[in-house]
Structure formats: structure tokens, C-alpha cells
């Protein structure tokens, strides 16, 4: 005799729409908020000289700096791993404001601002 299993319907092929509000899921005293506040308080005028006025609109330097610094805080130095975190981890998603820079972009930014970061 077989018993029918009653479960909620499941299909990962269905298109899902949901609103993600990481602000509600990240504690007020979480280190990611410290990184956000510190970078927001920085004067990044020196970064502007590193960008051209023409071409494709780049990601905001504050956002890029936030995800890199937070990754370093978590001992993540590989650009590919940082890219993966930006796609999966709610803290990185929050810092990046749901933008998804790829590993090449992260690496180029990191190399471009290395001197400014050290200063």
C-alpha cells in the first residue's frame, strides 16, 4: 500500500517574483553597516580623475570600494570569489545595491585605485 506524500508544490522552473529587502535582514550592528558608513564618509574626489567622461557609465566607485573592503574583511581576495559573493550573499547584495559587477570589472577597479586605497 502506498501513501501519497502531501507537499507544497515545487517547480524551480516557474518564474518567481519577490521583493528582497536586505535592510530588514541585516542587523543594525552588523560589520557590513560599518563598511558602508566608513566608505560613505570618505572623500573620494581623487577617484574621479581615474574616470573618463566618455564611454560606458561605470559602476559607482563607492559601491565598488565597499564590496572590495568587505571582501577583504572576510579574507576573500579573489575577484571571482567576490563576484560570486555579490551574486549570492545578502550582505554583498546590499552593499552593491543589487548591481552585479563581474570579476574583470572588480579586478580592473582594484588595480586602478590601488594607490588611492593605500593612501
Image: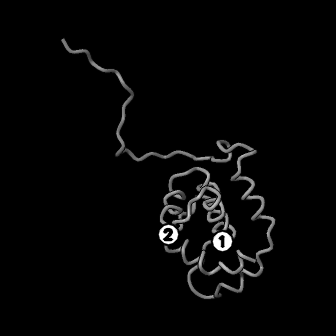
N-terminal of the two: label 2 or label 1? 1
Query: Could you tell me residue 104's position as x and y percent?
Result: 49, 74
Badge 2 crowding class, 10 Å Cα cut-off, few under 14, some 14 to 19, many 20 or more, is: some
Query: Could you tell me residue 52's position as x and y percent?
Result: 64, 87
**Quadrant of residue 111 within the rendered picture:** bottom right
- The mark found on residue 103 in the picture is 2
Residue that numbered label 1 is attached to: 60
Quadrant of image for the N terminus: top left
Query: Could you tell me residue 95's position as x and y percent?
Result: 65, 58
Front label number (2 vs 1): 2
In the displayed image of the protein, which residue is found farthest to the left? 1
> Cα distance, mark 2 to mark 1?
16 Å
Q: Identify the element where label 2 is drawn.
A: helix
Q: How many marks?
A: 2
Q: Identify the element where label 1 is drawn.
A: loop
Front residue of this view, candidates 61 and 79: 79
User: What residue is drawn where x is 67% and y is 72%?
Assistant: 61
Q: How is the image coloured?
A: one colour
Q: Mark 2 near mark 1, Cβ–Cβ under 8 Å?
A: no
User: What residue is drawn where x is 62% and y is 65%?
Assistant: 68
Quadrant of image for the C terminus: bottom right
Amino acid at each position: 500500500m502506498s501513501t501519497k506524500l502531501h507537499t507544497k508544490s515545487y517547480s524551480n522552473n516557474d518564474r518567481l517574483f519577490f521583493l528582497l529587502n536586505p535592510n530588514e535582514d541585516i542587523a543594525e550592528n552588523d560589520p557590513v553597516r560599518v563598511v558602508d558608513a566608513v566608505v560613505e564618509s570618505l572623500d573620494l574626489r581623487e577617484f574621479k580623475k581615474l574616470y573618463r567622461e566618455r564611454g560606458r557609465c561605470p559602476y559607482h566607485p563607492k559601491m565598488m570600494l565597499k564590496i572590495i573592503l568587505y571582501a577583504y574583511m572576510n579574507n576573500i581576495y579573489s575577484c571571482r570569489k567576490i563576484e560570486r559573493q555579490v551574486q549570492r550573499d545578502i550582505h554583498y547584495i546590499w552593499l552593491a545595491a543589487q548591481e552585479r559587477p563581474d570579476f574583470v570589472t572588480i579586478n580592473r577597479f582594484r588595480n586602478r585605485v590601488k594607490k588611492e586605497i593605500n593612501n
